Image: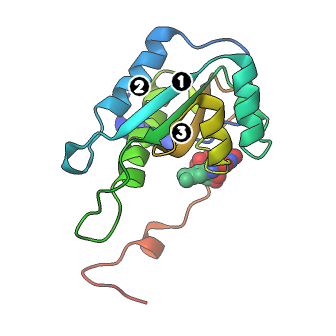
C-alpha cells in the first residue's frame, strides 16, 4: 500500500469486530514501531500488548470509561522508560519518540486491514497499577487495535493554506 493511501484511510476506529487479530499482523504493526526514528536513537519506547479480556475491560475503565477500548481484541500500551533527555530546543524526547512509533503503528495497522484509535484520555496511575508498570516509566498512550466495524467518516481538516506559511510566520 502506498504510504499516502494509508494516511488517507486511517481513521479513529471506535467499533471493532469481535474476532481476534492474527499474531503475524500484530507483529508487523509492532515492527513498524521498532523501526521508527527517535532522538539520539534512544528507542526509549516499550509496548505492553494486552489481549486478556478482563484486563482490557479494566483498561477501558482507566480510560475514563471509554468502553470501546476494551472491545478491541488487543490494546497496545505505549510507554517510555526514559523521561530525562531534553533536546536543545527545550522539548522532552520521550513523548515525541513514543508518539512517532505509535503513529507508525497506526499506519501499518491500516496496511494490515486493521484499525486503531489513539487514546490520550486515561488515568496513567490506574494503567500503571493494572499492568505493573514501574513508577519511573511513563505511560504515553493506549492504542486499541482490531478489525474495524464501522465506515470511515469524512476527514475534517483545515485546508493546507490555513496551516502552511511560505518562508516566514504570518499572523
Ligand atoms: C494525542 C491524541 C489523543 C486522543 N485521545 C482520544 C481519546 O482518548 N479518545 C478518543 O476516542 N479519541 C482520541 N483521539 C482521537 C482523535 O479524536 C482523532 O484522531 C481526531 O478526532 C481526528 O479523527 P481521525 O483520527 O478519525 O482522523 C486522540 C488522538 C490523539 C492524536
Q: Is 147 above or below relative to 90?
A: above
- Residue 121 screen position, x and y as percent: 67, 51
Residue 32 lies in what quarter of the image? top left
Residue 159 image position (x, y, % from top left): 50, 67
Of residues 13 and 152, which is closer to you in this image? Answer: 13
- Residue beneath label 3, please? 10
Per the model, the C-alpha gap separating discs 1 and 3 is 21 Å
Quadrant of the frame with the C terminus: bottom left
Answer above or below: position of 40 versus 70.
below
In this rendering, which labeled residue sits more in front, label 2 or label 1? 1
Mark nearer the N terminus (2 vs 1) = 2
Q: Where residue 23 sits in the image (x, y, percent)?
A: 49, 10
Question: Any atom of ligand 1 within 8 Å of the CB at mark 1?
Answer: no
Residue at the spot of label 1: 49
- Residue drawn where x is 58% and y is 39% of the image: 142
Report crowding for label 1: few under 14, some 14 to 19, many 20 or more residues within 10 A (C-alpha).
some
Residue plotted at (48% across, 21% down): 112
Q: Residue at x 52, y 38 (%)?
A: 9
Residue most toward the front? 135
Q: Residues within 10 Å of mark 2 (few under 14, many from 20)?
A: many
Single out the mark in the foreground, 3 or 2: 2
Q: Find out whether the residues at labels 2 and 1 contact each other: C-beta distance under 8 Å.
A: yes
Residue 45 is left or right of residue 51, and the answer is left
Image disc number at residue 30: 2
Whether residue 155 is visible to the viewer of this picture, yes or no, is no
Q: Does the residue labelled 2 lie within 8 Å of ligand 1?
A: no
Numbered disc 1: secondary structure: strand
Q: In which quarter of the image is residue 153?
A: top right
Mark 3 beta carbon near ligand 1 (under 8 Å): yes
How many numbered discs? Answer: 3
Question: Real-space Cα distance between discs 3 and 2?
Answer: 17 Å
Amino acid at each position: 500500500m502506498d504510504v499516502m493511501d494509508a494516511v488517507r484511510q486511517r481513521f479513529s476506529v471506535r467499533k471493532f469486530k469481535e474476532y481476534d487479530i492474527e499474531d503475524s499482523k500484530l507483529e508487523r504493526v509492532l515492527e513498524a514501531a521498532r523501526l521508527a526514528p527517535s532522538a539520539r536513537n534512544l528507542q526509549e519506547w516499550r509496548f505492553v500488548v494486552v489481549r486478556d479480556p478482563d484486563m482490557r475491560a479494566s483498561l477501558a475503565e482507566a480510560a475514563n470509561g471509554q468502553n470501546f477500548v476494551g472491545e478491541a481484541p488487543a490494546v497496545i500500551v505505549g510507554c517510555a522508560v526514559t523521561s530525562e533527555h531534553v533536546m536543545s530546543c527545550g522539548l522532552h524526547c520521550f513523548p515525541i519518540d513514543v508518539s512517532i512509533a505509535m503513529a507508525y503503528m497506526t499506519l501499518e495497522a491500516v496496511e494490515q486491514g486493521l484499525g486503531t484509535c489513539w487514546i490520550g484520555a486515561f488515568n496513567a496511575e490506574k494503567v500503571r497499577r493494572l499492568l505493573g508498570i514501574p513508577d519511573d516509566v511513563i505511560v504515553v498512550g493506549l492504542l486499541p487495535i482490531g478489525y474495524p466495524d464501522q465506515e470511515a467518516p469524512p476527514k475534517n481538516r483545515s485546508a493546507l493554506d490555513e496551516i502552511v506559511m511560505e518562508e516566514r510566520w504570518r499572523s
